Amino acid sequence: MASDSEPKAVDPAFTKSVVDKGADTVTLCFQCGTCTGGCPSGRVTAFRTRKMMRRVQLGFKDEVLPAEELWLCTTCTTCDERCPRGVKITDIIMTLRNMAVREGYMAEAHKNTARSLMKSGHAIPLGDAFRKMRETLGLHSEPPTVLSDKEALDEVKKIIKATHFDELVG
Amino acid sequence: MAKYSLFLGCIAPLRYPGIETATMEVAKALDIDMDILDKTSCCPAPGVFRSFDQDTWLAIGARNLSLAEEKGAEIVTICNGCFGSLWEVADKIEHDEKKKEYANSILKEIGREYKGGVKVRQFAELLYTDVGLDAISAKVTKKLDHIKAAVHYGCHYFKPDIVKEIDNRERPKTLDELVEVTGATSVDYRYKNACCGAGGGVRARAKEVAQAMTDQKLEAMKESGANCIVDICPFCHLQFDQGQSGLRTSFPVIHLSQLYVMAFGLDESKNGFDAHAVPVKF
Ligand code: SF4
Ligand code: SF4
């Protein structure tokens, strides 16, 4: 990533592709900083929502897509709701993350969560301790979800193939 | 009241199964006609799966909605993540014909269709709106006046508030009132409306950042004199319950359904408090 003193690579096609993907409200941002002011993540990190919006407007692709801060947003939507310009910030961040993943920026921890969904239809595994706990509560050891219905799980797996999610995660 | 079907999701049945049983006990006590929606999968989680690929998120969400549609039931969630995802998928399909076509082109491959219009509910707002505080109050047999709760709404409960019309995002009151109807006090604290820190895939990817947000809330709760946390989401629940292991604080973390099991004098073993990292005792 370029430091602040170096000239930055501007890629207008990047701004356009973000806009074309439906995140068009990014162009409305007038840099008031309301989003940053209420951001719970920005309170504890150097992530600045306002700056991210500006970088997208200016086409600083290399400062946006590979950046770790893109993944520090909790999607709490406080910023969306307060933005005086109606910028759909969380939707924009989602679009940017989808683009980042396509460029190969996907953390191992997130790949593992994705693999869990691909395998079991749930985001987390069910181990023996929790099976037992369920039984103690009078429940079936597996909940009546895709975990206890192979056909239903196959449906989810087919969706994952049809959207090519499996190829994306690798 | 409508016919309801409970969407289980991942964290409740797989980490805090007591939230699942407590919810069903409470529904029974309040004569809510609700069964469990079977064959469902992950909602899919908004912070992770929507971040990776919005098409997959939409299609799997639409499949879950189609299961409720088949039953003619409103889909009820006990998790703000599930609520956020299912509500948004339903909303996008409702207002964007292209998205609806796309979702159905994928569902067609598994012989399903989602026509649209399924109501997505959060159990807390269902209690507030469809059951009402008076009916809930009538079931309280054990006043919980020893409880000083720091309530945590969680982000995807009332936002976007103009559209959802559940509560005011800057000055919410529904959960405070749902808690106080048991005789408990809801205390005010700094950062009350702030995120727990876990969402958006942050817990999985940058645990220390998630924890820093949680710590700010815990610190504020401590200053407020609260003696427990009451939430309506198993993911926030996990974040607060496991996020206190440094033992700076030791607030019991209680889901609203579990609180009602206590207040209604129902079988407390159904709360599954064994799953909790911080013991639930006062
Ligand atoms: S609140 Fe809206 S207009 Fe203001 S800086 Fe943030 S995105 Fe831009
Ligand atoms: S949605 Fe993300 S960027 Fe916006 S306030 Fe919340 S954490 Fe910050």
Image: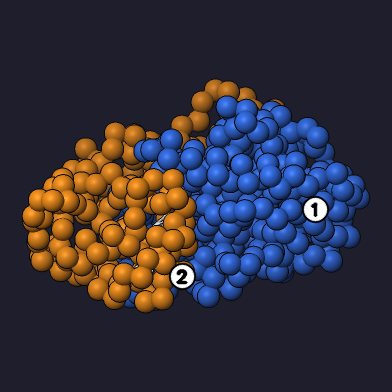
Chain colours: A orange, B blue
Q: Residue at x 9, y 60 (%)?
A: A10
Distance from Cα at disc 1 to Cα at disc 2: 29 Å
- Say left or right for B237 vs B132: left
Pick the front one: A54 or B112: A54
**The C terminus of chain B, quarter of image:** top right
Pick the front one: A79 or B164: A79
Cβ of disc 2 within 8 Å of ligand 1?
yes
Q: Residue at x 41, y 51 (%)?
A: A42
Q: Residue at x 70, y 55 (%)?
A: B188
Where residue B88 appears, as percent x and y from the top left, is 44, 64
Q: Which residue is mark 2?
A: A82
Q: Secondary structure at mark 2?
A: helix
What type is the residue that disc 1 sits on?
Answer: Thr
Q: Secondary structure at mark 1?
A: strand
Determine if residue B33 is in view.
no
Where residue B224 appears, as percent x and y from the top left, is 71, 48
- Say left or right for B256 vs B115: right
Q: Which residue is mark 1?
A: B185
- Which chain contains the residue that carries disc 1? B
Determine if residue A26 is in view.
yes
